[in-house]
Image (cartoon, helix red, strand yellow):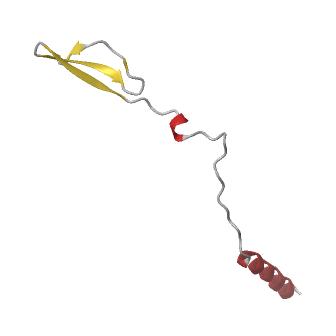
Amino acid sequence: MKKAILYFVTTLNLLFLAAPLSVAAMSPAPYALELSDVERKPDIDWQYKVIDGVLYRRLYNYSTKTPLTDWEIVP
C-alpha cells in the first residue's frame, strides 16, 4: 500500500513538473519610476581656477551646478 501511494505521488509530481509553462513579457507600469526620476548620489568634485598665477579650488556640486564652498588657495 505504501509503495502504491509513493508511486502515485511521484507520478503526480512528475506530471506537474513536466507540464509546459507559458511566460509573457509585460510592459512597465505607468506609475513605475523612470531611470531619470531615481534619486542618485550627488556628483561633488573640486573645481579649479588660476588667478594671477595662483591656483584656487572649491567644492562644486555638478549635479545641481552649484558651488558648495568659497574659493581657497590650493596648499
- Return the residue found at the far right: 1
Q: Position of residue 53 (x, y in %)?
A: 10, 16
Which residue is found at the position 38% from the left and 30% from the top?
Answer: 43
The residue that appears at 81% across and 85% down in the rendered structure is 7
- Indicate the quadrant containing the C terminus: top left, top right, bottom left or bottom right: top left
Q: Is residue 4 above or below residue 36?
A: below
Residue at figure coordinates x 78%, y 81% from the top left: 10
Numbered marks: total: 0
Residue in the foreground of this view, choosing between 72 and 8: 72
Query: Residue 54, percent across and down?
Result: 13, 15
Judging depth in this view, the residue of 69 and 29 nearest the camera is 29
Up the image or down, 28 lies above or below 8; here it is: above
* Quarter location, residue 19: bottom right
Asked whether residue 38 is in view, the answer is no
Residue 14 located left or right of residue 55 = right
Q: Position of residue 59 (x, y in %)?
A: 32, 21
As displayed, is residue 12 above or below residue 60? Answer: below
Relative to residue 5, is residue 69 drawn left or right?
A: left
Q: Is residue 21 above or below residue 69?
A: below
Give me the residue at 54% from left, 35% from top. 37
Residue 21 lies left or right of residue 73; in this view the side is right
